[in-house]
Amino acid sequence: MPKQKTRSGAARRFKITATGKVMRRTQNMRHLRRKKSKKAIRAYRVPVEVKGKWARKIKRMLGLA
């Protein structure tokens, strides 16, 4: 039988926790950081949970659903 391949782009961008949550990095971290407050830049470092329909789609891309 053929095996299911994971989408490598999704595998690099998203991580699955032990409880099954889908985590992603925050946006607004690439450039123009000089304008942003230090508090905001620190908050961008923390991974964010993907919820709802997108979480199901991402799990399917990773071969978990």
Image (tube, rainbow, N blue to C red):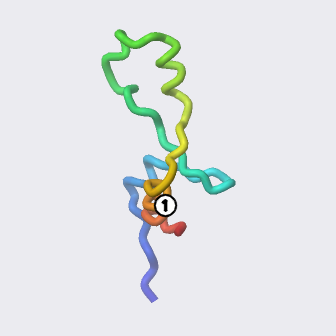
Q: Residue 51 vs residue 34: left or right?
A: right
Q: Above or below — where is 41 with respect to 18?
A: above
Percent coordinates x, y for residue 31 in the rendering: 32, 22
User: Which residue appears at 37% of the width and 53% of the height?
Assistant: 9
Q: Above or below — where is 59 with respect to 46?
A: below
Which one is nearer the viewer's eye here, 32 or 1?
Answer: 32
**Crowd around label 1: few <14 · some 14–19 · many ≥20 (10 Å):** some
The furthest residue to the right: 19
Percent coordinates x, y for residue 64 in the rendering: 54, 67
For label 1, the SS is helix
Q: Residue 58 vs residue 46: left or right?
A: left
Which one is nearer the viewer's eye here, 57 or 41?
Answer: 57
Q: How many marks?
A: 1
User: Which residue appears at 53% of the width and 23% of the height?
Assistant: 43
Q: Amino acid at mark 1?
A: Arg
The furthest residue to the front: 52
Percent coordinates x, y for residue 24 in the rendering: 49, 43
User: Which residue appears at 53% of the width and 38% of the height?
Assistant: 48
Instruction: Find residue 35 and report its image quarter.
Output: top left
User: Which residue appears at 39% of the width and 61% of the height?
Assistant: 7
The furthest residue to the left: 32
Percent coordinates x, y for residue 51 in the rendering: 51, 49
Q: Above or below — where is 41 with respect to 17?
A: above
**Residue that label 1 marks:** 56
